[in-house]
């Protein structure tokens, strides 16, 4: 229906309203997809082994979603595989790095070791007063700053819950040179 309306509406006033409607539909679709993913994670075997090649598929998928962003991904992997719960965490952290990068060139550093995983980027970082709020369900820093980044605010909630299920801890800190470092200890 939106495709039909997109072709048929020619009046500029209505096109502007239709653009708003399309954005809201996309946000609703994103919310539904995120909620379904959240449910799917709880259904899956969190200890299923995932081949390390899947990390490249995460990166490729995210690059396709953000084709306008140039990114260098530096990897330091000292493990022979990931559990499904670790895979989900890596996916969420890489997605956030791409989504919130405010520079023309994203630099990412990903470290996966037997007792921790870590993602660092050169993005905007997080204001110190927001560090605990980012783990609250549906909370989004960006919507209070620019209103431009789509999402529903469940990614970091999921990251923390998965880490805590494993008795782990999530540490978030701004890098001195700019950007953010998220470290999951387990």
Image: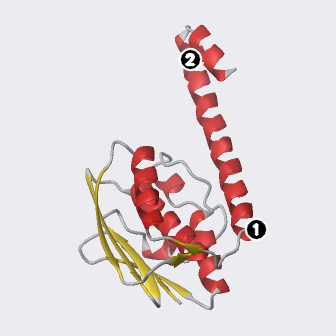
7 or 72, which is in the foreground? 72
Rendered position, 147 above or below 162:
above
Q: Residue at x 55, y 88 (%)?
A: 169
Rendered location of residue 138, percent (x, y): 65, 61
Q: Position of residue 132 (x, y in %)?
A: 55, 77
Viewer-nearest residue: 147 or 63: 63
Residue on which disc 2 sits: 15
Q: How far apart are the two marked residues, 1 and 2, measured between alpha carbons?
A: 42 Å
- Left or right of 169? Residue 1 is right
Q: Quadrant of residue 117?
A: bottom left
Look at the numbered discs 1 and 2 and tell me whether their residues touch, using CB distance below 8 Å: no
Q: Secondary structure at mark 2?
A: helix
Position of 70 compared to 155: left or right? left
* Left or right: 146, with 30 as reference point: left
Q: Quadrant of the N terminus?
A: top right
In the image, which disc is placed on residue 43? Answer: 1
Q: Quadrant of residue 40?
A: bottom right
Q: Position of residue 124 (x, y in %)?
A: 35, 63
Q: Compare residues 175 and 70 and report the one nearer the observer.
A: 70
Q: Residues within 10 Å of mark 2 (few under 14, many from 20)?
A: some
Does residue 185 show up? yes
Q: Looking at the image, which residue is at 52% across and 12% down?
A: 12
- Specify the quadrant of the image occupied by residue 41: bottom right
Left or right position of 127 against 32: left
Q: Which mark is residue 68?
A: none
Q: Which-is-in-front pick, marks 1 and 2?
A: 1
Q: What residue is at 49 percent from the left and 56 percent from the top?
A: 142
């Amino acid at each position: 229906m939106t495709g039909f309306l997109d072709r048929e509406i020619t009046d500029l006033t209505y096109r502007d309203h239709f653009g708003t409607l399309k954005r809201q539909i996309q946000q609703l679709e994103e919310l539904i997809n995120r909620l379904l993913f959240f449910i799917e994670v709880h259904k899956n075997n969190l200890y299923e082994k995932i081949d390390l090649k899947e990390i490249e598929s995460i990166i490729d998928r995210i690059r396709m979603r953000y084709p306008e962003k140039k990114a260098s991904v530096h990897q330091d992997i000292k493990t022979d595989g990931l559990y499904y719960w670790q895979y989900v965490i890596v996916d969420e952290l890489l997605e956030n790095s791409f989504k919130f990068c405010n520079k023309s060139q994203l630099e990412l550093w990903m470290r996966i070791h037997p007792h921790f995983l870590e993602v660092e980027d050169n993005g905007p970082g997080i204001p110190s007063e927001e560090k605990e709020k980012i783990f609250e369900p549906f909370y989004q820093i960006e919507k209070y700053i620019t209103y431009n980044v789509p999402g529903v605010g469940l990614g970091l909630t999921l990251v923390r819950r998965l880490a805590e299920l494993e008795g782990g801890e999530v540490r978030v800190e701004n890098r001195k040179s700019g950007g953010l470092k998220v470290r999951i200890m387990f």
